[in-house]
Each structure stands twice: as C-alpha cells, then as structure tokens.
Image (cartoon, coloured by chain):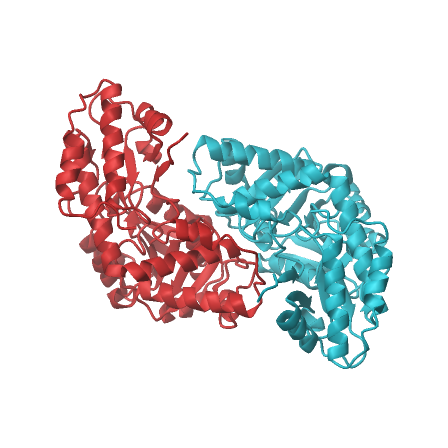
Chain colours: A red, B cyan
Amino acid sequence: MIFQTQLRIPGPTQLPERVVRSMNRPMIDHRGSEFAEILAEITTGAKRVFKTSNDLLLLTSSGTGGLESAIANLVSPGDEVVAALCGNFGERFAALAAAYGADVVRLEFEWGQPVDAADLAAVLERHPNAKIVLVTHNETSTGLTNPLQALARVAHDAGRIVVVDGVSSISSIAIETDAWGVDVAVTGSQKGWMAPPGLALVTVSDRAWAQQSKARSPRFYFDWKEAKTWADKGMTPFTPAIGVVFALQEGMRMLEEEGLDAVYERHERLARATQAGLEALGFRLYAQDGYRSNTVTSATPPPGLDVAALRKLLNDKYGVVIGGGQGKMTGKMIRVGHLGAIAAGDVVQVLWAIEQALEELDIAPSDGRGVAAISSSLQGVAAATR
Amino acid sequence: MIFQTQLRIPGPTQLPERVVRSMNRPMIDHRGSEFAEILAEITTGAKRVFKTSNDLLLLTSSGTGGLESAIANLVSPGDEVVAALCGNFGERFAALAAAYGADVVRLEFEWGQPVDAADLAAVLERHPNAKIVLVTHNETSTGLTNPLQALARVAHDAGRIVVVDGVSSISSIAIETDAWGVDVAVTGSQKGWMAPPGLALVTVSDRAWAQQSKARSPRFYFDWKEAKTWADKGMTPFTPAIGVVFALQEGMRMLEEEGLDAVYERHERLARATQAGLEALGFRLYAQDGYRSNTVTSATPPPGLDVAALRKLLNDKYGVVIGGGQGKMTGKMIRVGHLGAIAAGDVVQVLWAIEQALEELDIAPSDGRGVAAISSSLQGVAAATR
C-alpha cells in the first residue's frame, strides 16, 4: 500500500514522528539517574495536565490495569461501591469492583445519556456507607463525556472518594483534578498522550491514601504504597515499559509546546467538524447533544448501511480504520476517534472516505455533502497543526 | 559521550538494531487482522522456546505482573503454598502469595545455594494439602540457576502444580515445560527475548486450568480465562503494549535464526568466560559451583573494594552499567548480566573495564589478568555473533 493507514479508532492513537524517533534509542537502566530524570519530567508534566498536586504514579499496564489498581487499593470485600454507568466502560469499571467482592450499587443511565448529578446525590444519600464512587469521564463506547465537575462535586461534598476513569479523556479534554475534588484519576499512554500503549497514570489524593491504608484487597504489582515509595527514589517498583516512557516524555513535551488550552480547543473543533460531517451524510449522532465527546464520535448509520461492510471498505480501500459498536451496540454503530496527534486535514480525509464508501455501498451518492459540511465547520482553520 | 553505554545488568537487556528498527513504525489497531497475525507468530514461536503445547498468554506488565497472574488465578485465601526460596526473587514470589492470603510454607536455602529436590519432596510429604509449588528457575539476585528439572519432577509426581518464575532464564537457559512437568512458567520481554520491558509471557497447563476454575482470589486485568478467550480470537482483552509486541516478534525471529541450541551455548560460554575473568581479578563467585547462572554472574569483591565506587567509575568513565547486590547483599556484591543480545567481545569489554577500574581504585594493578583469563576461556570463539 502506498498510503499510510489512518488509525481513527479511539486509541491506540497515531504516533507523531517525533514520538517514534524518541524510542529509536538503546535501553537504559531503570535504576539509574537518567531514568530518574525522565520520570521526574513525566511526573511534573502529567501533574500539570491533571491539574493536581496529588501524588502521580506510573504503572506498566493498560488503562484497565490502572483502574484495577484503584479498586485493589481502595476496596475491601463487601464494601458498598457506587458505580455510575452509561456505557460499556462504566460496565467494565463496575465489573472490576465486583471482581474484588464489592457490593456494587448501580446508578444506570441509557446508553447515550450522561450520568445525572442530582440522581447521583440521591443514590449517595440512600447509601451512606458507600465510600467509593466510580465515574467514567469519557464513555468511549457511546462517545459521551459525563459532566465530571458536577458529579465529582456531589460525591466529594458527600464525603465520598471519587474515582475517575479518564483513560480516553485526560490530556484531550480538560480536567481539574484538585479543584473538582477528584480523588483518583486514571489515564493511559495510548490516548491523548500520543504514546504507544503500555503505561497507566494514576493520581491519588490524601483522602484516597487514607482509604488505601484501610482497604484489605490483595495487591502487589498494583500496590500504590510500593509505587509511591519507589517513585520518591526516582524509580518504579518493577521494571517499567522503558520504551513507552521515552515516548510519553516526548508526547508530553509536544502537548506543552502546543499549550494545553490549544490542545483542548483543537479536540473540540475536530469533534464538532466530525459531528457536522457525519450528520450531513445521514448518520445519527448517538450521544445526547451537549455531552458529545471531543475525543470520539459515535453515530448510528443511515438506513440500509451495513456497518461491518463500511468498516471493511474503509480499511481495505482507503486505509482508514474506524471503530465499531461495543457490547449491545456491536454492529449497530460507528465510532470515529479524533484524539491525540490529529489535525483538521485528518478528519476531512476520514469524512471524504466515508462519503465515497457510502456511494460504493449504494447508500447515497457522493455529492460532497459530508466534505462540505466538515469544511464549513472548519472554516478558517489551518489544515494541519501537528 | 562518544561511546555507547554497555548495559550489563540482568535486564532490561540491550536491544539489537533490528529490534529498535522493528518499533520504528506506526501504531496498529489491536483488534485488527495484522495484530492477530503478529500475535499468532509470537505465540507459536514462544511455545517452541518454552517447549510446550500448553496455552500461552501475553500480558502487558513486567515479569512480576506475570507472576501475580499465577497467584491470582491459582490461589485462594488460606491455601497452603510451598515457596522454594534461595534469594530475593524467591522472596518476592513468596510475598506475592502472602499478599493474596496464602499460607506460605517456606523451604529456604542459603543465598548462593540451590533448592534441594529431596528437601522439596520431604516438605511436600509433610504438607499434602499444599497444591501449589513456587520455584524460581534463575535466581537473579544470587546468580544461580536451580535444578528445575529435578524440582519440577518431584512436585509434579506428588500431584502438585508447579509454578516457575522463569523471568530471567527462559529463552537464554533451556526449559522443557511439558517434559519436565512445569504447569505454569512466566517470563518477561526485556530479558533473553531482546525486547524492551512491558510484556509478560505465561504458559498454563491443563492441571493449572483445573485449579484456576476453583481458585477464588480477585482477578480482572490478570484473569487467564479472559486472556485465553481473547487470544483465541487473535486479541488481548485489554490494549496491549503494541510497540513491545513488534519488538518481541523481531527478537523472537532473531532467536530462531540463531537457533535455540546455539543461543543456549552462547549464554553458557559467555557465563563461563565472565566467571573466569572475575575470579582472575580476585572476585569470589557467589553461587555454588555447578549451579551458576548462564544469564547473570554474581560475585563478592576483593578485599577493600567499595562496590558503589566501582559501579560509579564503570558507569561514568567506561559506560559499563553492572548491577549491585539486592536485599541483604546490597553494597556487598556485583552482578554482571550477560543475556540477550550479547556477544563474546561484549564480555571482554566488561572485564577489561573492571580490571582498569580496580587499578584506578587502588585495589590491584591492571596487568591484563582478567582480560587474559576471559580471553583464554573464549579461545577460538568469534568476537561477535550478533
């Protein structure tokens, strides 16, 4: 293939050339001074992104490993845990708590709807012993961003520990960990950070530390206390994914050079453009208006369109890889990722390819509607910012 | 610095140029066909190295994460577990089991001594309910390789489940997982496999699967059943460290091209040469003769030598990074790694640097004893095989 595959799933995201080059180097000793310097830079940089002065820990795992660390460090068997649910990743977080023996209180909303803060407040009032509240910031399966500030406020003011799955949001969508009262926030290297998968980043507040010392679930590899003890010496307890550490350092430098506000604006702009283009092509946006995600757009197809056939054609002929539905939406939805190293020209390319494919699949003529809509949305925006 | 740092710790090991280049490429979809093909190649290749037809699972974690998966999948709280111990990594494995509530039966030997098969048989007879036996194949902290075949035989014949920490041995030191009756074996990508850290490989026998279905420890990220279900579809349950997967594929191809027997012989030859060189320089080999490791040599220093000063001088002036002692041997031992992408010329360089450093530290004149001894041991060996 002469063209470069366009990875437009909601992670792993494409690597900038600079990040690829950052890994083009020999291994180093993870107990040496150079590693300590890199870890310090990453920790300081990540705290700026999380907007926190809490402890920041680096774990070698996927984002789910980071979430498991939260459960293993905070929950004892039999503990009541409130899981606020509106999609597949919320379900995963709840299943994780259940796997550790938590008594999971489900606060469930329709897929595509956000978690409601007033309902959360009511659940917490009914369950005064539920110390832990699990919230998904960006529900990747439905393309929805929950109103985290409001949800965290409610839970924090009720004296609960707020644990946030920010895997597909943090560094692409603003979070104010300390100001919003988020006790634990988790993200993964392969999303907005523009690095390969392999590292989870976790922040831990004082309130979470106090709970950690009481929680009695088994933990070793994911033990926060060990991670913190070693982090204070410039190390990780176990051999870290050093190559991904190099990449994360470089990705973080790129975020800082662009400026976080500009990064967030870029994601918002490309999300709006993608939404406009898909609607013009007859897709229905799945997430409720006002809560649509800036990192991934989910949409149900126009009548007659076979999602699997569309994805295959996009992949084989146009080199564009998009996501499908998860869980109960398998085969009934497309999900277009637009996070990390992505610029205006990239989303135009995706929409153009989808428009071509719709004609080839006899769904609608390619008359430029999709491209025109996205182009109009992007009026005045430079073609490439990376 | 004009010279390239020589990483001679027992892992992470240096990356061959080919492996570095293998990661010089864009990310791919971990739910796509290309990933499935790579996973299939890695799985088939790794089974050849493990000499097993058992299931092989790939986890995104360090080797310790792989070991934790064994405990979480096999042990229920209160279960008796026999831990055969002769060093720091054996202690870690025992601590892992204890963290999951196991009643750990310690079969302990002096550091530098191997685990004795007859003693293991006696312990198993005294503890008929201990279903799980934890064995460290290569005890990295003391530079010792346990007689795994004999130990596994004893435990297997007694009907127990043999769980082997092969993190720093497998692919550098021969193992015959099926023939020896090893139920679970764990290794890590950053050792003999010549890839960066970030992946653990775990094999699971039928006997281990039967135990897995009964064990009641919490597990989610490390759940073998999930890993197996997804592996059968050419995937991993959670986003894997894709860059390390590329590297592992390439490292494995290099192992196959060299031929496993040749790889094992090379490690043995370089270990013997390192041992000869260090003894000539007045170091005392720490591990008992007959059980010295082919991947890492541990030795106590000649009188008056400050290990920290030696390591600092080697690092700063010669670019040679070696390990120090762990646990109770901190500051009292050196550990020289010779595994993975390493050739005869590399160990000569290490010994030369140590000999120079001993003169600079006023311990012994540099009269070429160390280099002569290692050179004599390597008589007739090509300088570089990689």
Quarter of the image where the N terminus of chain B is located = bottom right
Instruction: Give whichever of A102, A311 is nearer the camera.
Output: A311
Q: Is residue B5 above or below residue B203?
A: below
Instruction: Give whichever of A320, B141 is nearer the camera.
Output: A320
Instruction: Give whichever of B322, A153 is nearer the camera.
Output: B322
Which residue is found at the position 64% from the left and 57% from the top?
B11
In the image, taking residue A313 as reference, residue A232 lies left or right, namely right
In the image, taking residue A238 as reference, residue A208 lies left or right, namely left
Which residue is found at the position 24% from the left and 48% from the top?
A294
Task: Estimate the x, y position of residue A180 in percent, counting from the top left.
Answer: 25, 64
The answer to whether residue B187 of the structure is visible from this angle is: yes
Task: Estimate the x, y position of residue A370 in percent, counting from the top left.
Answer: 17, 32
Which residue is found at the position 38% from the left and 55% from the top?
A187
The answer to whether residue B115 of the structure is visible from this angle is: no
Q: Is residue A20 above or below residue B237?
A: below
Instruction: Give whichever of B104, B323 is nearer the camera.
Output: B323
Task: Estimate the x, y position of residue B127 in percent, counting from the top left.
Answer: 75, 53
